[in-house]
Image (cartoon, rainbow, N blue to C red):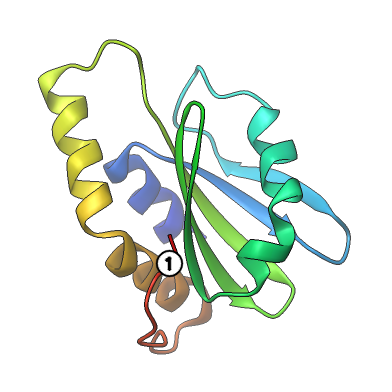
């Protein structure tokens, strides 16, 4: 899990673990002070959608989430929080993350499972 937290730090993302059986979400790594628990309710409301694909990107009012299904019932979510006032650096990080959604999801899968990630498209 340390490598996933390091990746989240590089990408300026929060990491949320979602267990669909227990209907629980937990922050594994919190990178943004402005993060709140609304993201947990949002993800649980999208559970059917995110469980039906290996990789999913979902927009919400504060940013977007890249969801990686690590096994049939558990997901790791990278939450990218957009701030109202972008700095040049933040904007570049967000553009980079949007351009590489599938790659980010595949890296998450490989880091967690230590096997090669499926080569499937990301559902947006």
In terms of image quadrants, where is residue 94?
Answer: top left
* Residue tagged 1: 108
On the rendered structure, is 81 left or right of 86? Answer: right
Q: Please, which residue is most extreme toward the top here?
A: 85
Q: Nearer the viewer, residue 18 or 9?
A: 18
Pinpoint residue 117: horizontal percent, then vertical percent. 40, 84
Pinpoint residue 9: horizontal percent, then vertical percent. 35, 41
Pinpoint residue 36: horizontal percent, then vertical percent. 63, 23
On the rendered structure, is 120 left or right of 70? Answer: left
Q: Please, which residue is most extreme toward the right here?
A: 22
On the rendered structure, is 70 left or right of 8? Answer: right
23 shown above or below 108: above
Residue at 32% in and 68% down: 102
Residue at 51% in and 27% down: 61
Total numbered badges shown on the rendered structure: 1
**Element type at mark 1:** helix
85 shown above or below 36: above
13 shown above or below 98: above
Q: Nearer the viewer, residue 62 or 69?
A: 62
Q: Nearer the viewer, residue 52 or 23?
A: 52
In terms of image quadrants, where is residue 124?
Answer: bottom left
79 shown above or below 114: above
Residue at 20% in and 55% down: 99
Q: Residues within 10 Å of mark 1 (few under 14, many from 20)?
A: many
Pinpoint residue 54: horizontal percent, then vertical percent. 52, 76
On the rendered structure, is 80 left or right of 52? Answer: left
In terms of image quadrants, where is residue 80?
Answer: top left
Residue at 85% in and 55% down: 23
């Amino acid at each position: 899990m340390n490598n996933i937290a390091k990746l989240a730090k590089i990408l300026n993302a929060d990491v949320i673990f979602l267990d669909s059986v227990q209907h629980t979400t937990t922050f594994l790594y919190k990178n943004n002070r402005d993060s709140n628990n609304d993201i947990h309710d949002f993800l649980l409301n999208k559970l059917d959608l995110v469980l039906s694909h290996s990789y999913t990107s979902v927009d919400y009012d504060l940013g977007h989430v890249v969801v990686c299904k690590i096994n049939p019932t558990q997901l790791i979510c990278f939450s990218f929080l957009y701030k109202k006032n972008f700095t040049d650096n933040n904007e570049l990080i967000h553009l980079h993350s949007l351009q590489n959604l599938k790659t980010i999801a595949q890296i998450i899968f490989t880091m967690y499972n230590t096997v090669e990630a499926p080569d499937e498209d990301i559902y947006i």
